[in-house]
Each structure stands twice: as C-alpha cells, then as structure tokens.
Image (cartoon, rainbow, N blue to C red):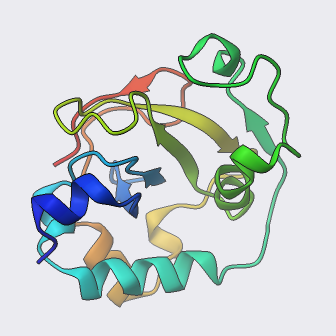
Amino acid sequence: MISDTEQMGYDFDWFFTNGEHIGHVASGGGPLPASVAMSAENLAKLWDYFSGLFYRCAVNLNPELKTIENLKTNPDVTDPSISSFTGMASRGLFSFDKTTVNNFNNPYYHLVASPVEPSTIAELPAEIRDILSATKYDGEISGFGNVGEVR
C-alpha cells in the first residue's frame, strides 16, 4: 500500500486504460487512484514493463502546452523537462502530467505527448493487461483535453 504521505511527497509514474488505449501519468505529488495505491508491487511491474518497451513511433506534443501553468513558453520534443513524457508516448502510450503540481486535492492531469501509433490493451501480455485493467478512465484519452479523475 502506498500511503497518502508517500503520494504527496513523490512523483509516481502510474498507468491506466480506457479499455482500448493506455495512459501514463506522472503524479506530481497528487493522489493515486485506489487501484494503484493498493499495490506498490503492481505499480513496479507496470513501470518495468512499459519502460522496457522499445520506441515504436513518433510523438505529437500537446499544442496547448505553452498555455498550461508552470511550463516553458516553447516546449519541444527534445526538451529535457518533457523527455519522460515523449519517451512513454514513443512506446505507444498517451502521457500525462499533473496540471497543478504538489496540490494533493487537485485530481487533474493534462496530456503532454501522444503516440502517432498508439498501443492497445489487446497487445499486452495477460498479466500486464490484468493489472492495468484495474485502473480505468471512462473517457477518451487520445485527445488533447484534460483528464479528470481516474478510478
């Protein structure tokens, strides 16, 4: 179990699905969904799996990044501050960051980078698919809008 105190003090990378596509999130000191917080072991398995994938495609940056609070005025795919997001997107995941960093009560995230060729949950090994399926978002994750609460 990952405690609230740990969640507030650490930037966890966690993963979710909408039943088709896969999302990666940097928590930025925000709350983790209960399905993620309940097992640090499962979180580590997902991290090991997704970070170990080869790059498979080009990425698109969210064209609205420059208008989101706390970001540089002209981010690009080589910007070191977004390289972890573009890295995950190049592996086929939609990659999100906490919109208001270190605000534990704010559950909102914004898309930083999206894959040109998205991975699907059907492509995953059964164990990874089963763990990932516990954390769902009921909306579309492939657009450039904000994502709210993930359960």
List the single residue furthest toward the top. 67
- Residue lying at 51% horizontally and 85% vertically, measured from the top left: 48
In the image, is residue 76 above or below residue 18? above
Confirm whether residue 85 shows in the render.
yes
* x and y percentages locating residue 126 in the rendered image: 36, 87
Residue at left offset 15%, top offset 60%: 5
Quarter in which the N terminus is drawn? bottom left
Image coordinates of residue 95 in percent, x first then y, are 56, 47
Q: Is residue 21 visible?
A: no
Q: Position of residue 21 (x, y in %)?
A: 47, 52
Of 125 and 87, the residue lying toward us: 87
Q: Residue at x 31, y 32 (%)?
A: 139
Q: In the figure, residue 7 lies in which quadrant?
A: bottom left
Q: Is residue 7 left or right of residue 69?
A: left
Residue 84 or residue 8, whichever sits in front: 8
Q: Is residue 140 placed above or below 81 in the rendered structure? A: above
- In the picture, measured across the screen, residue 35 lies left or right of residue 87, that is left
Q: Position of residue 52 (x, y in %)?
A: 64, 84
The residue drawn where x is 32% and y is 29% is 108
How many discs mark residues in the rendered view? 0
Which corner quadrant of the image does residue 132 belong to? bottom left
Query: In the rendered view, would you say 135 is above or below 72?
Result: below
Q: Is residue 144 left or right of residue 52?
A: left
Please tell me which residue lies in front, 58 or 41: 41
